[in-house]
Amino acid sequence: MLNPMRRIAGLSLVELMIAMVIGLVVMLGVVQVFAASRESYRLSEGLARVQENSRFAMDTLQRELRMAGHFGCVNDQAHNLQSPGSLQTTLNATAHPVLNFNQSIQGYEATNTGPGTSITLAATPTVGGTAYTPALPAEVAAALTNRVDGSDIVSLRYLMPDGVPVTAVAGTTQRPVFNFDASRLDVLRSGVATPGLYGVADCLSATVFQARSVDNGAASITFGDAPNNNALFTSLYTPGQTVLYRAESIVFYVGYDATTAQSSLYRVRFSANPSGALVAGAPEALVEGVENLQLLYGQDRRLNSTSPSGYIDRQGTAKQVQESLPDTTAAWRRVGAVQLGMIVSSPDRASARQADGAAALTTMGVTFTAPTDARMRAVYQSTVALRNRLYGN
């Protein structure tokens, strides 16, 4: 017969403690595996977001930079080779530099950010205080109030690629009225509700102007007295050989969004309604995580010649381009390539290792010191040939 006392015997204190230790060791292993997996996921997620955002930012800037100098079937470089130059503008560029379509690209170099310098990236960057060379026009500075200090800015002007053929020209040579197919109105608008800045071009000349009025029903655009015009047409345009475009003046920069507490690639579009004053659109955040933008410009070796050589063998900052010739418009017209570099960070902490001397953040000759916020950061660079400045076009 079994002893009744042995049937009700439990675990001893030693056995219980051993079981608890084994359980704790197993739990600790599970927690360690979970923590490692979580950190690995955050790092992978941060890298994926950085790569995705940088791709969008690069694609946007490359596409826009390649449009600089587009004025119909003949670009601004070729227009300038004619005597007199066949690229005309009725717009008052003296009062509003952003309407200087004779200078289709203009860079602004943030002070002390050229090659060989160092920049410390702050977790919360300062905005609106950096000086630039050349100086920002007052209307640009007023529109870019959230611009991040220490980051370059570029302004582009061109005619949109989606133009519409002119079916009839009324009025006079100096004050023409352009008619087009009404079904193509949305093509001409190219995403802007009530555009007032236009360009008209054939393969001999191009003119940029502000419309006095736009008749959507009759599909006509009338040129005349308008707040931003200070000259008349000088070229005659023939139906069937002429295309009408919306004119674009746009600025790209790095701005800080206090709501998301992160820097982003921004753009501001300058436009005017028909017979309206020039206005700056609201800053538009395009790609989050872009913390700094550095730009270098390649110039044709023939600076003082009317005809370019086709060799881009000079490279410099916006300050150096601005000072390369007394005629700054001619200096910028010799820009045929743009090198751009950007620092892009992940939206959230990614358990990334702090960059050090062995893996410093460097782009366009500028070295960056990142804050210790565990965000993933990477450098992305590209060289963009301005296709409307290519020799022979």
Image (cartoon, grey):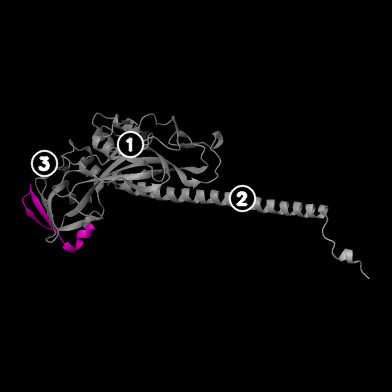
Question: Considering depth in this image, is 204 or 348 the residue closer to the camera?
Answer: 348
Q: Give the residue type that dot 1 points to.
A: Gln
Q: Residue 64: say if magenta.
A: no
Which is closer to the viewer, label 3 or label 1? 3
- Mark with earlier residue (2, 1): 2
Residue at x 34% of width, y 49% of height: 63
- Residue with the mark numbered 3: 231
Residue at x 11% of width, y 47% of height: 235
Q: Residue 135 placed where, x, y %?
A: 28, 31
* Location of residue 303 with respect to 221 vertically, above or below: above
Q: Give the residue type that dot 2 points to.
A: Ala
Q: Disc 3 and disc 1: Cα gap in Å?
A: 31 Å
- Mark with earlier residue (3, 1): 3
- Residue with the mark numbered 1: 299
Does dot 1 land on a helix, a strand or a loop?
A: strand
Question: Considering depth in this image, is 334 or 147 the residue closer to the camera?
Answer: 147
- Residue with the mark numbered 2: 35
Left or right, 239 with reference to 320: left
Whether residues under marks 2 and 3 lie with C-beta atoms below 8 angstroms apart, the answer is no
Q: Which residues are magenta?
A: 167-187
Q: Residue 105 placed where, x, y %?
A: 28, 40
Q: Residues within 10 Å of mark 1 (few under 14, many from 20)?
A: many
Q: Disc 2 and disc 3: Cα gap in Å?
A: 69 Å
Task: Farthest residue to the right: give it.
Answer: 1
Does dot 2 land on a helix, a strand or a loop?
A: helix
Q: Give the residue type that dot 3 points to.
A: Ala
Quadrant, the N terminus = bottom right
